[in-house]
Image (spheres, rainbow, N blue to C red):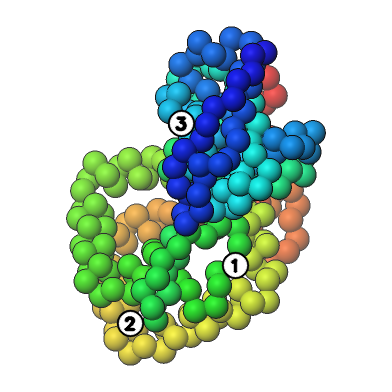
Amino acid sequence: MCSCLYPAHGLAYTYDMSTVQLELVYHPGAKDAGLWLYEDHRLDAPHRGPFYVGIASARGRLNAVRRNKHHGNIARKHGIRREVYGFTCTWTELCQKEIDTIALRKAQGHALTNQTLGGDGTLGVATIINPQTGKRKQWPTDKPLSHGWITDAQRRFQDPEFRAKNKAAHQRLAQDPEWRAKHKAAAQRRAQDPEWRAKNKAAAQRMAQDPEWRAKNKAAHQHVTQNPEWRAKIKAAAQRRAQDPEFRAKHKAAHQLRVHDKRAFVAATGYAGEFRRITRAMIDEWRATQAPQP
């Protein structure tokens, strides 16, 4: 390893960073690499482990001190020993290495000053807004919001113009036969994936056992069903479907198929419960046990 000191120039927020000592420590092969992953340690106590993980594709980034306010506080007080590792992979692969390294260091108990989960963009961070003052700031997505703050996405959906545009865009997509075919095929692939179904089922069970979620869901459902306009739309849509011969034929065929599957399930398993309580999941699980083993 070769070690050399570089003067660090520039301002981080309102703090003068020109006095920060930055020691670059290149690991074997890193100095001539084109992409780097680095870990910042306290210069006066490198044994304490890293307090920041980053990536760079230019030496200027390696020599720069400015990162964020928390990082700057530590750098000004203790200096930086920057451990540099070289890579010959693609930028996308390097971004993933940074994400993995940040996750590893956090799992090891290191208090990192990284404001995101790593990689390009702001993974793990959302922009939140105070509607009263209009002030914006970055906020970790795994932390509850501060009182009175909302996410940028929530602010957009409170805007009637944005909601109208979003609705129109979705309606155009829903009327596109190619998009509908792709969407249907993707949904069918997910439904046939045992791992996805298990995760989806577990998530639904967790929500169903959450009293707060159940109360909110019930309140939202009651609010919608008590709306005369919504009830009139649902009734009109049901009447149109009932008068459509094609829909009635499909509905009848699907019902006959469900009844046939349920009867086969009862005959094969000896199910003694209510016929209407037999679900598609029960039938699929039974069929999976009957499938020939390779």
Q: Residues within 10 Å of mark 3 (few under 14, many from 20)?
A: some
Tag 3: amino acid:
Arg
Q: Report the Cα–Cα distance between label 1 and label 2.
A: 33 Å
Q: Report the Cα–Cα distance between label 3 and label 1.
A: 33 Å
Earlier residue among tags 1 and 2: 1
Quarter of the image with the C terminus is top right
Q: Residue at x 45, y 24 (%)?
A: 59
Judged from the image, the secondary structure of the residue bearing numbered disc 3 is helix
The label nearer to you, 1 versus 2, is: 1
Residue wearing tag 2: 230
Dot label at residue 61: 3
Residue closer to the observer: 151 or 238 = 151
The label nearer to you, 3 versus 2, is: 3
Tag 2: amino acid:
Trp
Q: Residue at x 36, y 70 (%)?
A: 155
Q: Quadrant of residue 112?
A: top right
Residue wearing tag 1: 144
